[in-house]
Image: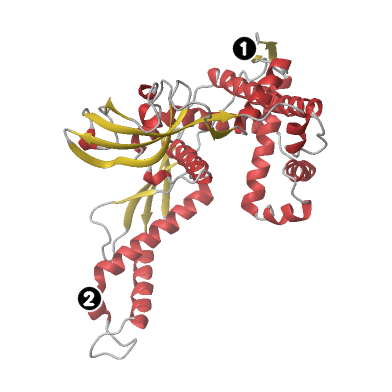
Amino acid sequence: MKIQVEAVSPVEKKVVVEVDAERVARELDKAYESLGRRVKLKGFRPGKAPRQVLEKNFKDEVERDVVNRLVDLAFGEAVQDHGIEPVAPPRADVAEPGLQPLQPLRFSVRVEVKPAVQPKDYKALEVARRPVAVTDEMVEQELKALQDSLARLQPVEGRDVAASGDYAVIDHVGTVEGEPFEGGKAEGVTVRLEEGDFFAGFFPQLAGLKVGESRDVEHLFPADFRVEALRGKTGKFAVTLRGLQARHAPALDDAFAKELGAPGVEDLAGLKADLRKRIEAREKQREKGELHDGLVKAALARNDFEVPPSLVERAIDTMLEGAAQRFARQGLDMRQMELDIARLRGDLREQALLQVRGALLLEAVADAEKIEPTDADLEAEIGRIAEENHIPLEKLRPQLRGAESRAALRNRIREDQVLAFLATHAKISDAAPEK
């Protein structure tokens, strides 16, 4: 078998193969022998059908299988002998006239590979960071957000006329051009009497309406509305006010703090101290993430290289899978949200490209600097994950025992070590705090 490897581009190789006629004949013989043992043909006992009969009935199928097998074998040998690291399934092209008796088989295989990145100028990178600075105002905002999250709607007492800011319970019947439409009728819906997105439940037009009274509300359906038949048309909604509600938040006192049940928190002062610690931990992660992003972008600005398209597509797939999982945790099915996936993939492409280029560059720096996690590093990271997620170490270890899981963990540690190396050698200045 003759194998020749050509570089089509920094991220694609072409493997040109010629399989000698003798090997082709052997593979065909094996294929027909195997087929003869399996196939049942009328007039012949199992395994006794002549080769000519098998060729007459199964020639195309056998030759297709033999070509696929030879392509796989040749590509496997090329990968091993020439150090090719595929990042996507290969694409084979069989030369004309294809598989012929007593003739060599010629074909080529094109495959995407990682680029050979030679990192340069990755020391003395200039980056700015926003240092951790937890203020009393940040603590108060967090406390207020916590208070708001625990607020509950309660019936309005002492008045029956809707006012701006109220939550109203309504019934509505919607029509377009005098005809009802699907989804236009509802009962017992809670809406907000403030300016905002009509389709998100904001009805400022109901202010001044008395409980039990009705009012017509008109709204123009946008040109890109999810229901095509309603796009650009005006909907008329007959709205009846059934009740008024207002949000009531719990008082910020020691009882509020204790009821939250946070470990060690007994009063409001303790709650504020706990929130400060949480904000500080979050800010440290923010600072670390922003610094790492800055280091990668600064290094990439000094290192330009091509990346395999398949890795970018795979990164986009991962992002979409993550989004689907987040929606699922909220009880939403992304497949039923009528999203323009093609447009969404386009929007994510630049971010995915940056992610892939960054990972390849960090890998190249690790190789250049001979940065490699030790077994002790791996064990320390497993211990940190167990502690951070409150998982007993003996339960976490079996989950990371597989080769793929440990390789992923090792790669993540290696990337963190490279980023720490870049930070050590970088020129880091403090940016002005955001207002």
Closest to the observer, 157 or 402: 157
Image x and y of residue 403, in percent: 64, 53
Give the amino acid at mark 2.
Asn
- Work out whether 311 lies above or below 402: above
The tag on residue 333 is none
Q: Residues within 10 Å of mark 1 (few under 14, many from 20)?
A: few
Looking at the image, can residue 389 be seen? yes
Tell me, yes or no, whether the two marked residues, 1 and 2, touch with CB atoms within 8 Å. Answer: no
Identify residue for label 1: 434
Q: How is the image coloured?
A: secondary structure
- Taking the spot 23% from the left edge, 88% from the top edge, the residue there is 42
In this rendering, the count of numbered labels is 2
Foreground mark, 1 or 2? 1
Image-based side of 92 in relation to 385, left or right: left
Give the amino acid at mark 1.
Glu
Identify residue for label 2: 57
